[in-house]
Image: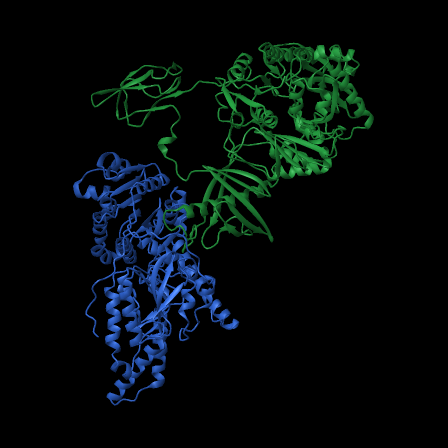
Chain colours: A blue, B green
Amino acid sequence: MTAPAEETSLTRREEMAAKLASLHEEQQKAVEAGGKYIARHHERGKFTARERIELLVDEGSAFLELMPLAGWGSDFTVGASIVTGIGVVEGVECMIVANDPTVKGGALNPWSLKKSMRASDIAEQNFLPTINLTESGGADLPTQKEIFIPGGRGFRNLTRASARKQPTISVVFGNSTAGGAYVPGMSDYVIMVKEQAKVFLAGPPLVKMATGEESDDESLGGAEMHSRISGSSDFLAIDERDAIRLARRTVARLNWRKAGTVPTSAYAEPDLDPEDLLDLIPADLKEPFDPREAILRIVDGTGPGNEVPFDEFKPLYGSALCVGWANLHGHPIGILANARGVLMSEEAQKAAQFIQLANQKDTPLLFLHNTTGYMVGKEYEQGGIIKHGAQMINAVSNSTVPHLTVIMGASYGAGNYGMNGRAYDPRFLFTWPSAKSAVMGPAQLAGVLEIVARESAEKKGEVFDADGFKAIKEMVETQIEEQSLPYVLSGMVYDDGVIDPRDTRTVLGICLSVIDNQPIEGAMNFGVFRL
Amino acid sequence: MTIQRLLVANRGEIARRVFRTCRDLGIGTVAVHSDADAGMPFVRDADMAVHLPGNTPAETYLRGDLVIEAARRAGADAIHPGYGFLSENADFARAVIEAGLTWVGPAPESIEQMGSKIESKKLMEAAGVPVLGDASNASAAELPVLVKASAGGGGRGMRIVRDLDALPAEIERASSEAASAFGDGTVFVEPYVENGRHVEVQVLGTTDGVLILGERDCSVQRRHQKVIEEAPAPGLSDESRAALHEAARKAASAIDYRGAGTVEFLYDADKGSFYFLEMNTRLQVEHPVTEAVFGLDLVALQIAVAEGRSSAQMVALATTSALDPVGHAVEVRLYAEDPAAGYQPQSGTITAFDIPGVRAEFENLATPGIRLDSGVGAGDEIGTFYDAMIAKVIAWAPTREEALRRLAGALEQARIHGLRTNRDLLVNLLRDPVVVDARMNTTWLDGADLAVLGAAPGGEDARALSGFAAAIALAEGARRGAKVQGRIPAGWRNVVSQPQSTMFAAGEDELEVRWYGGQTFSSADLPDVRVIAVTPARVTLERDGVRRDFAVSVAGDSVDVDSSLGHVALRRLPRFTDPSTQVAAGSLLAPMPGSVIGVRVAVGDVVAEGDPILVMEAMKMQHTIAAPYAGVVSELNASEGQQVEAGAVLAVVSTGSTTEEEEEGTA
């Protein structure tokens, strides 16, 4: 690292430490979302969603929880009453989706829906089996209008996954009624927990109302009934642990083979200590930082077959964007990282070429954001910044190699698009606690508003009240600043999670391993490049 | 005559010990072995092996006729009996000689003369060897007395009587015990020496007279079974020692003894006096300590005597012609046993057996160090048919203190996995002030608190730290062996909701280890412990600035952790159990739903394998449920006409078999 003064480094580190402490606090809100209901749940001899997952995944394996802060800043509990992530079950990477029954009985709200849809997308794109750990009271009724219509897609997704040969397993721990009954209903394998699972289209009161028939939970939808009589359940588990055992046995028999290339495990850890990533990000994002300092702390270190950890491409051209090749946990990748915030014509053209090269050799791409957007101004407009930016966006949009995105710092304006922001469907997108995303910087946005207001006043022949506008400007600045913070975007499921920078290598390593579930085929065709 | 091929009518370490000398001397070797011993190292050590069908000693190693037949078939011209089994059986010795084979042992008459404790005592008394008088008519003032079986050995059939009224009954019981154990109910009574030490003299009878090869102290005994043996005996005055040696010479000379033998004395440490106990007409278990201090090969000397060589030729075998002991040697008997549970013998597979610093096996040390005489190695089985001794470990050093320290250190650092042993007890004994100051007597250990003396060095702390080390080593191993994400940090979580949990059984207890994974491991329960390094086989932990290495060995469910805190044996508990495997063994389950149309047995009935238990009808088909093996019907849950569900337990057949445990006699 270009040894920043010790004082600076300490400040940066302290700043990052405070952000990480806050991240941990927000994550704990999701973990403890059930509050007193967690104890009550335990008293009934039941496991929480995370306990079920911990038991389900292989001993010593990693679990990458996705979207843990979904619903942050909304009226709903952080985490949106679902726990989801990628875990290794019997050596198979699986998408795990667990209802959190300690939060309003596992009722689904609009954020739960968004989160589960994203989980289903990840499973589809990366060819993962899905394990649903089901126990939910159904839709959150006050917000049913936002859930009912789009929510039907979840059941369609299950059967379409099955049709794609991506097996689906449903373990029912409790309520899974009405629409929820279609989660086991549409799954390939169903396990129900004795005396706990309750799976029916209508419960005894509704049946009574509809047909006058007297019935009870167990005969309408008990685990015994479904396992012995209706056949809607394939396995009767004697308890929750047994259900998880059966789910693991089911995965063990999926005969799962990863169709992608599995790398060797002979590679070196990074040449530079990932711990230093805490010192990297300036407190004020106006100050640029060298992304190579991040790259060398994330990618595989020097070793046989990897003599140079990061081979930079076109280093003398468009130097505000640093691109090059590296290995990460043994997987070859191409990296695009902003070196000086702004993207100009050269950077855009360099990116477009680099993305095509990655597609030519079926190599995944990693985008490391710290961009303030495309350059503006007469000279640049006349130089064709739009068409050059369009080339980059064309390349990003039509590239078919897997994309991974990490927002380290700024991600403003069309830079967010060109660098493969959420709207461009990267396989995975994570943010560092230092990240900020918005249409433009808060100060610029407020400044623009002031100019527009002044012009408007002048046009009307009015006197612009500069002092009066100051308050508005400050308010807008604060609001934009708040909205650009990672929790807000994470809460809206615009990323897959906020991560500790030191975990970046691990997170990306898991993602690249997951990606290997299917072969990588780079694009042969792109849109028409406006040259 | 010169022996060309020798059969050892024994097993385990003593067979290996004799084979080693035979190899040195150029003598061919023949082993005999039971069914269970077929794969044991002593069988592999021999040039040839003959199978003795069966397992109990009575079927195998005690069958003199089969042993002689084995020698004939394998072309052996000599038989060495080792110790125990047939070693002091005069009839066998005679049969060997009559079969035209060389008997590596004393004359059958010598065995007979010394075989009876009562007769031998009379003989010794006549030869001027001090003996304890007959106390069968002891007065209250002469109490306590000791009742002993004449044909006994290894302390069996012995009892101390402190109450005169109890004496007749004790004699009665000792006699009936002796009758069933040795086939000879003769017992005798002698005064009991309270602070008695066991001191024995190694003799070698030759055509030119009796050589005295010093003495040994074997006072640390548990229930009359020797635990620690050493040479020379500590704390003996020159006069006592000389008198002792002279008494032994008289004893051996009195019967014109030939070969290696041991004259055992009860040494009254308070008075400095000693009394003849018995003479063992064979090689002793503890012979290596004598070999160490004299630089001799006692088996080679036995063979030389059997071959009729002269005493001068034999002394030439010795490295020290003066026959003065050099340095001090201590031996311990490492047993597969649980001292805390009344020395209950343990059986199972030794999954690791590694004693550091072993410089010699079955042979003399050239320089001070550790000698190992072991009948088993890693992967071998300790069964229930024979003595549970795993090995003898011997230290030889210039002084007694150094020998004790070396031996304790080697045992402490040894890796012995798979079954419980008396290792911790031995280490503690070798460091106990009573032993270090040579204040032990033959009853001291039986009165000691084994909870303290047998305790592992590290205590509770050892379990917590070793358990943590085991859990993270397992996690690291699981990660490295994983099909995917093999280099992602073990147990990594981006959102930490709870510690990882690994369950072990530690003896009778359950041990839950709670830990966190990720870029570094940490313990949820030991916050002051820092993890320095982790591999699947070794973990380095730091606490209070002190680093400690933990070697973790995994074999199936067993996880053994060795460190400076001692050995902690753990068993992984499964995360999941298939409930269908949870039914009692021998349960007969309904193969499908149906009705019971016939019950053929009642609870308590003895059934043979294949006997019908009940008949079921389902889907118009009859199914007979039969006994899976011979046993007793211990449970019956079905009656005629009853509807049963698939998987219902209809009946349980318990095995009623009992395997009788038999032990060989060792001294």
Kindly give the residue lying farthest to the left in the view shown. A211
The N terminus of chain B - image quarter: top right
- Position of B64 compared to A80: left or right? right
Question: Residue B518 at what x, y percent from top left?
Answer: 45, 53
Question: Residue B76 at what x, y percent from top left?
Answer: 55, 18
- Position of A396 compared to B25: left or right? left
Kindly give the residue lying farthest to the right in the view shown. B239
Depth order, front residue of A393/A414: A393
- Position of A154 compared to A267: left or right? left
Kindly give the residue lying farthest to the front in the view shown. B1
Position of residue A93 relative to residue B623, above or below, is: below
Depth order, front residue of A460/B164: B164
Tell me the quarter of the picture where residue B556 sits.
top left
Tell me the quarter of the picture where residue B227 sits.
top right
Position of residue A319 relative to residue B460, above or below, is: below
Question: Residue B604 at what x, y percent from top left?
Answer: 40, 15
Number of residue marks: 0
Depth order, front residue of A355/A222: A355
Question: Residue A266 at what x, y percent from top left?
Answer: 41, 53
- Position of B485 compared to B404: left or right? left
